[in-house]
Image (spheres, coloured by chain):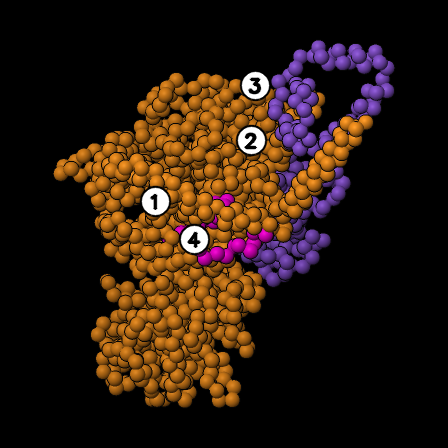
Chain colours: A purple, B orange
Amino acid sequence: MKIPSLLLCIAFALSCVASVSALQAVTGTITTNQILQDLQDLGPAKVYLNGGQYVAYVEEDGAFSFSNVPQGSHVLSVVSNLYQFDLIRIDVSPTGIMASLTHPGTSWNRQGPPILTPLEMRPRGKFDFFLPREGFNPWSLLSNPMLLMSGFSMIMFFVMPKMMANLPEEVQEEAKGRREEMPQMPQMPDISQGLANWFAPQAPAKASGKRN
Amino acid sequence: MFASSLRAAALAVLLAVVLCGSVSAAIHADQAGTYDWHKALVGIPKFAFFTRPVRKAQIYVGTQKNVIALLNPKTGDYTWRQVLEPADDLKMLSLQDQVLVSVSGNGSLHTRQWDAQTGLLIWDHEHVNPPASTSAAVGRVGDDVLLVAGDSISRLKGDDGTPVWTVTADSGATYGRIILHNGAIYVIGAKQISNLHEVSVLQLDAKDGRIVAEYQPPNGNVKSLDDVVFAEHGGKAYLYWNGAERAYRHALGQSAETEEVDDVFGIKESRIQNVYGSDESASDLVLRNGKRYTFMRSSDSAKYTFEDEAEPTESVFSSFKSEGAHYISYVRPSPSKKEIKIDLLDATEMKLVDTFSVPFDEQISGAIQKAFLDVAPSKDGKVPSFRIFAVTADGSIKLLKAGEVLWTREESLTEALAAEYVDLPERSLLSQDHDELDEQPQESASISPIERFLRRARTHVVKAAAYPQQLTKSIKSLITPPESTRVRNDLYADFFGVRKLVVFASKTGKVVALDTESGQSVWERYFDGIQFRQIETVRSALVKYPPVIVLVGQNRQAQTVLLRINALTGEDFNEDGSSPREVFPAIRKVIKLPVEEAAGRTQLISLIGDNLKVHISPSSAAASDAFERFAPQYHVYLTEGVGSSQIDGYTTEKGTNNKYELKPSWKLEFPEGEKLAALGSPSPAGSAVASLGRVLGDRSVLYKYLNPNMLALATVKTTGSFPTDSDFTSAVYTYLIDTVTGTVHYRSEHNGGGNIAPTVPSVFVVQKDNWAVLSYWNHGPEAALPQVEPPAPEEEVVTKKTVRKRKKKVSTEDNSATIPDAKGIEIVALEFFESSTPDQRVESDTFSSFQAKRPHVIAQSYSFPKRISAIGTTTTGAGITTKEVLLGLEDGHLYGISKRLLDPRRPVGAPTKDEKEEMLFPYRPTLDFNPKEVASYNLHVPKISHILSAATKMESTSLTIAWGLDVFCGRRNPSKTFDVLSESFNYLALLATIAACVLGIGFSKRLAERKKIKDLWR
């Protein structure tokens, strides 16, 4: 118990049931907020203590109650298929009940920030089950890597010869020499090249012989 | 060259995007309902009320699935439903003056009043000392609610449920009926005296609950309290019951008086017939004499005798009383059994309105068990229109009116214990090839090669002729949206193999085959008195023969019945000469064998008797030949199921007179106090596994331990009776055992783990390939066992406690690591490898359970925020797609967790370079609930108890059905739909681009030609 004693005192002072008995009543309400504006939208909901050892159903005004909760620490969760609620830890002692916030994955030996009782449960969020549909965007089509790549090679197709033409003679010669020296990498058969050849006018045999 | 290397890089990027993109496989909002369907059900009614409070009629039901619902008679849909917990047994539902009160519970007892129009709770009263007895009754005094539970009777305030007074009747009778008459409360019960029940009456004062009198009227022997009928005549309240030989009546309050019904009404050998009313007020009285029925009007001696005769078990009476109108309906089957006849009697006029007939096939739905009548007020003297709400023996509910069935709800699906997918046959002409493939060698030898060639050529010609049609169809299916082809009547597989049949077999004897595309019923069968618990597909539709399934059930004599059914039509299958129905006495377990008999190509079914004798179905010579060959390698393990404390292994051997029987080979008794809580099922040999090992970041391989005999199971050990008791402790133990040798390969303890409550089973195991996933509820530190065994050194168990310890860097005592530090659902992932060192595996061509090698098991546990009610996995054709563990959540979701998150190799702490390369997620002690992973999106699918998946022809897609209360069917794509173009893909744009390209090339070809000619001329 690492909670400051002051907080403990406040929590005990606020606990609603003061009678000294082994069984205590835990009550609360599901209340509306920005996320849940009307309780009618809540859908089928109930409240579990310890995953369903005790079950409370929700009344029309959102109220729920567990009449006989024995001593010990309990975890309270709201079962709703549409809304997200906090997990609440309930500590029942002969003097009263104490509620605190808890999170899955945190140590059960530590208590989170205390919460007023009777509990007021407000949804933390509404579940969004769907992926947003991406609208058609011409820019996204253009930013496609394949399209960018083909666009780039298209530009190079026109620009490269011009650039080469502008270079001085000796640099061109040098580049040509270097190209011939370079080891030829085995190449995959290029479908687009093959198709282009197929569509191209039938050249005389010696023209095709020039190709590697 | 530059371009090609760039292209390779782009391909790598694309692949990376496909493979390691987000784990989520959610759908878009507009896709909801296109690839999935949901049948929202309520269960088989135990209690039903057909009322007409104001103008509009309403049907309230309380069902065997503990659901309370208001049905709309127009459509059959529910206006609201309140799904009570499975352990919260609905004992009583009462509707009086539009006040709906339920009594439910198991262990504790709750009385709740519900708002009849909205289904929301008004008040909840919990009994401090719940009685052991199961009977309950509800009555009303003014605005207050009178409640009888066991032997305690209390009056609860109508507005908040606080008790006004409570009395205990220590007479030893069980009370089940409350009658208010002249300001006195009469509580009717039955007192057991040896084998007989005697009607017992308790008279109370309504004000203070004082017991005025307690007596048993003479001749009060009844079979059960349900046989006692309450009716009012001339201001007196009477009880009627059928005695052993005669029917009696007793006026309440006059303890010593019992009259014989024969004498009162002057009908010889009369019996009391049950009449279903719209609420719980005084019943109408119908007397039966043989097969003749007479209606007695309560207030005077007027009576009406129905002309038609019918068996008492087949005729159902119901009455309707509202605003002065009073009608009686008499429902019985017509002699042809193809329709039912309904006599409608106007009870105020004592005149038969008419006899109506409604088409009704008793073969499919069984006899009507309960009927509730509603009559719309007739305007200007016309024939009043009536509707009858009927519950039939198969568990379906119907609304009948004159001449037709308005709607049917197949509520038997809520009681389905087993389901099986049936692949539909291919439409293509492949079956002709199969004809050849299927030939026996002798037959092949008898055909001349020329004839064989001609036959092959013929097949090709037929195929070629059918090809254009197929091509146009596939093109059409590309262009038109898929929705238009959802409802089809022909039973052939579709292109992607997502259309199958799913056959449900229920406890009520109903078998329903649904189309997985539309959810519509394809065929239905009803078998009276057989409780189905298992379905096996013994022959799939791949060959020219129809698919065959075997239904396994138990008849009323507790014998095991096997039914052979043609899975496409639902008809009895007897083409191969075997009998479609076989009955075996005293059978313990029914197992399908991985062998088929040569004649009919159906797989064998073995039945293991209580005396360990092995029976084989079908009982043909071919089948016993096939079994003879298989028997040496046939190993069986038997348990008594959940709650048992041992598991036994057997081998098969030939006993006396050539019958096979089981011989015990091993026995595993769990340590003191451990009880079996959940059993996995080993993946059958030859199930699709894409890769034999896991490639690690440094390109070394951890080989998977793929043993088809590896069984994962979990046991629970508890002390104390209820989790909130001070002496309560609980722990879950995981076992991995070899079912051939009984070797325990692995055992681990999960301290504090267990079931949420004794009545709420929450330990689940699922296993697949080389992994298993276990989930349980952790009761937290308070329920942990005080003494802890040190964990075995070779088992590397990483739990969240150790993580936290590392973070906090606090040195605690050694065993504190196993004291749980959480309260909630925990999921444990186990994975088995052949060796702990990479690149090392068992050096053997074959794999044997008898090898001494033990698997290397690694495990990790996670906490999960939602309660789990069922667990399953996805299945895909080749096993390449990442698996997904499917969970039924108590919130009403079907949820998928990617196996990549349930991976025990997830690194604790910062991942190393190799671990990053392996694309492992860093370990986190919690698995978050991600709404994008909810397969059933915003639908409310509560109480999922079974999840079944099937592979489709698309590797990315797994067909999934979840049922329990509702039935939900959808598709899961755990690695996204990598083999299907997205449905937004623009085929027209693609075609247009190709056309433009072709045109452009042709155009530029002409230009180039012209230029070339010009150049030549130059």
Magenta portion: prevailing SS class: loop
Membership of B114 in magenta stretch = no
Q: Name the residue that disc number 1 marks.
A: B539
Q: CA distance from mark 3 to mark 4?
A: 50 Å
Name the image quarter holding the C terminus of chain B. Answer: top right
Foreground mark, 3 or 4, reads 4
**First in residue order: circle 3 vs circle 1:** 1
Task: Give the amino acid at mark 1.
Answer: Arg
- Disc nearer the start of the sequence (3/4): 4
| Spatial separation of the CA atoms under disc 3 and disc 2 | 27 Å
Residue bearing the label numbered 4? B491
Magenta region: B480-505
Q: Secondary structure at mark 3?
A: loop
User: Counting other residues with Cα less than 10 Å from the Cα at mark 3, is it few (<14), some (14-19), or many (20 or more)?
Assistant: few
- Of labels 1 and 2, earlier in sequence is 1
Residue B489 within the segment the image draws in magenta: yes
Q: Please give the label number shown on residue B698.
A: 3
Distance Cα–Cα, label 1 vs label 4: 17 Å
Q: What's the residue type where badge 4 is placed?
A: Leu
Real-space CA distance between mark 1 and mark 2, rounded to the nearest whole angstrom = 47 Å
Chain name for mark 4: B
